[in-house]
Amino acid sequence: MAELIRVENVTKRFGDVVALDRINISFESGKIYGITGRNGSGKTVLFKTMIGYLKPTGGRVVVGGKEIGKDIDFPDNMGIIIENPGFLSRYTGYKNLEYLASIRRRIGRAQIRESMERVGLDPDSRKKAGKYSLGMRQRLGIAQAIMENPDILILDEPMNGLDNEGVNDVRSLLLGLKKEGKTIILASHNKEDIEILCDAVYEMDHGRFVSTV
Amino acid sequence: MPESMFVRLFAGVPPDYFDAIPLIPFGQWLLPIGIFLLVAGFYWEEGRKLEMLSLYRYRTVSGWWKWHFRKGMLSGIRTAAGLLLIVLICDMAMGNGAALSRKAVAGIGILWLFHSVSMAALFALLDLFLLRRFAPGLLFLLEGVTFIAGCRVRGISHVMYGMWGMYLQSSLCETEGFPAGAVITAEMILVAASYLTGREYLMSRNSSDRPAHLLR
């Protein structure tokens, strides 16, 4: 399997606080990776660093052979959910996705509709995103992450707020995406998600990997 | 002319105040400025909700900033023009419109519009930093303090930002007023400087993260 992402000796400090402490890890294509750890262990900071939202204090992140912050600012072939995704409350779910899709201009209405249907949302619904439940917002977040058919998905707690049916739907979706050759890196507190979905699991604590399964 | 709401709200403070701070006309001037900053605040707050999911789609930080800044400017122009139009229509409906000359309406509108656009540019710049929550307050303060300074020390009034949007303080209305053309040019330079400063800040290797508020 080809190596898609390489995190080399990455350290991230906020003042005196060390959020990431010399992290080394690589991710291959076509696998699902799980990152676990209690709140504040450094999972979200690691994800933000891999996306290019945070600059590492030391070390480097290479995605598809290109170094973040040097060769490119943000990876080109990624879909993300970081924390609870926010949307424009006065727009419908479809309009929010259309707005996001208009930035890269890679996909049309059909792909937006398809991604919403894949996560169990009605693209024709007139309901505004501001009226969405936490679970619906999470589904919409997953739809925006997958709609442009990215090779890499970075999902921070994608099951947050989902009911049992929603969790099962998302699990099936992620396993289907894995079969398509996508690389998925997900953070979760739910051991069942990790056991069912992941090929490799890394546990973080105090900005370091403390165990690998 | 003094009966017109359009003039009272958008033309500024007449230049015949020297020692005392002109509380009532100044308060009337600050009212639409406050509304403009409030609307701008709501606009940036709403836009921020989608930032986490949109930023990486721009591929480059400078690409994001260009789009972000341009959208802020367009929103500012829409808000400013909307406020001018609403008050003008109200004036017409109340029968005060006849007192207004076309030249005065155009002069008041142009100066207020350019002043609003420069405020929108400063708002966009401040929004990059962690003090973004205070942006409306800081700009309101800038407007107030520089106007009062210009009122107190007449020698510096032409270079005071708080005077720049006021038709009644300009050469379009007063021979002693600030040169309107030069002020419009200065406001446009301020817009360009805000854009370039924001871009340099975001591209700077010294800034730890970009934009800083995504740290939240």
Image (cartoon, grey):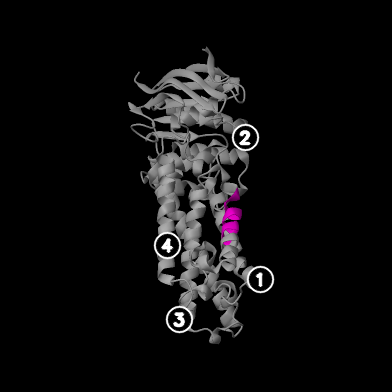
The boundaries of the magenta stretch are B134-143
* Residue indicated by mark 1: B20
Q: Which residue is mark 3?
A: B103
Residue indicated by mark 4: B186
x then y, percent, for residue A105? 36, 46
Q: Is residue B70 magenta?
A: no
Disc 2: host chain: A
Amino acid type, residue under disc 3 in the picture:
Lys
SS type, badge 1: loop
Label 4 with label 2: CB-CB less than 8 Å: no
Residue A136 occupies which quadrant of the picture? top right
Point 62% across, 34% down: residue: A161
- Mark 1 packing: few (<14 Cα in 10 Å), some, or many (20+)? few
Q: Is residue A176 above or below residue B5?
A: above
SS for tag 2? Answer: loop
From what the image shows, is residue A126 above or below residue B87?
Answer: above
Report the front residue among B177 and B103.
Answer: B177
| Mark drawn on residue B120 | none
Q: Mark 3 or mark 4, which is nearer to you? A: 4
Principal secondary structure, stretch drawn in magenta:
helix
Real-space CA distance between mark 2 and mark 1, rounded to the nearest whole angstrom:
60 Å
B140 drawn magenta: yes
Q: Secondary structure at mark 3?
A: helix
Q: Nearer the viewer, mark 3 or mark 2?
A: 3
